[in-house]
Image (cartoon, helix red, strand yellow):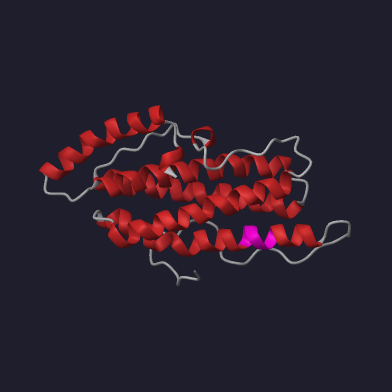
């Protein structure tokens, strides 16, 4: 994902985070470039999911899409708050001004798009596939224990988001031209898990 972030934004982020990383290293911490990159990209993923979820909650034509957008806002807002706390404890201060506009990997569908629902869901499918790989890498090789744990503990919910977006997109395609539609999204409350994570599904 970071390769698609505007160079000016990424440069500014690393200029800010590098100072904290040096201070942390001098204090005996283990914050690495991998951790810094993960913290930035995870924050960007959350910001994008929040912004696009808000858009979907008002622009979606299917009530299930609007409900999914609401859940993305709730889940990723909670995730962002936890990430900011964990990152600060690890010695990385993240910018709070990130929005979907910074995320070229998840372009916002036009509100006037007649296929908005499917376009939005495809955006979330692509974004969550990318995020899962990012979180898996941090969970495996991250040196900052707090960030690595955050990544590991939140993989299950990211995967649930991906499954739900894929299922809902399939339901919309199958229900085209018919009334009603299939079931809703898989269960499991809102909010990212700040404690023990559930099992992997991918």
Q: Residue at x 44, y 36 (%)?
A: 5
Q: Decide which of 132, 55 is in the foreground and name it.
A: 132
Q: Residue at x 67, y 44 (%)?
A: 56
Residue 200 vertical placement versus 14 (above, below): below
The spot of residue 136 in percent (x, y) is 39, 60
The spot of residue 164 in percent (x, y) is 62, 61
Q: Decide which of 142, 1 is in the foreground and name it.
A: 1
Residue 15 vertical placement versus 193 (above, below): above
The stretch drawn in magenta includes residue 114: no
Q: Quadrant of the N terminus?
A: top left
Left or right side of 197 for 176: right
Q: Decide which of 159, 197 is in the foreground and name it.
A: 159
For the stretch drawn in magenta, the main secondary structure is helix
Left or right side of 142 for 4: right
User: What is the span of residues highlighted in magenta in the rendered image?
Assistant: 164-168
Quadrant in which residue 172 is drawn: bottom right
Residue that extends furthest to the front in the rendered view of this protein: 3
The reply to whether residue 89 is in sight is: no
Q: Residue at x 31, y 62 (%)?
A: 140
The spot of residue 33 in percent (x, y) is 26, 45
The spot of residue 160 in percent (x, y) is 55, 63
Quadrant in which residue 23 is drawn: top left
The reply to whether residue 160 is in sight is: yes
């Amino acid at each position: 994902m970071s390769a698609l972030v505007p160079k000016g934004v990424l440069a500014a982020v690393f200029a800010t985070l590098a100072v904290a990383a040096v201070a942390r290293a001098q204090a005996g911490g283990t914050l690495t470039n991998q951790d810094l990159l993960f913290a930035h990209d995870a924050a960007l993923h959350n910001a994008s999911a929040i912004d696009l979820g808000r858009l979907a909650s008002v622009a979606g034509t299917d009530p299930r899409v609007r409900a999914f957008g609401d859940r993305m806002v709730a889940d990723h807002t909670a995730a962002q708050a936890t990430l900011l706390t964990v990152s600060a404890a690890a010695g990385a201060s993240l910018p709070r001004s990130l929005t979907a506009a910074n995320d070229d990997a998840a372009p916002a569908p036009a509100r006037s798009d007649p296929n908005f629902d499917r376009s939005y869901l495809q955006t979330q499918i692509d974004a969550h596939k990318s995020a899962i790989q990012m979180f898996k890498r941090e969970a495996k090789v991250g040196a900052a224990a707090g960030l690595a744990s955050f990544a590991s503990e939140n993989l299950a919910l990211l995967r649930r988001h991906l499954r739900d977006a894929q299922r809902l997109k399939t339901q919309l395609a199958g229900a085209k031209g018919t009334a009603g539609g299939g079931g809703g999204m898989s269960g499991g409350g809102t909010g990212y898990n700040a404690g023990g994570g559930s099992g992997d599904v991918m």
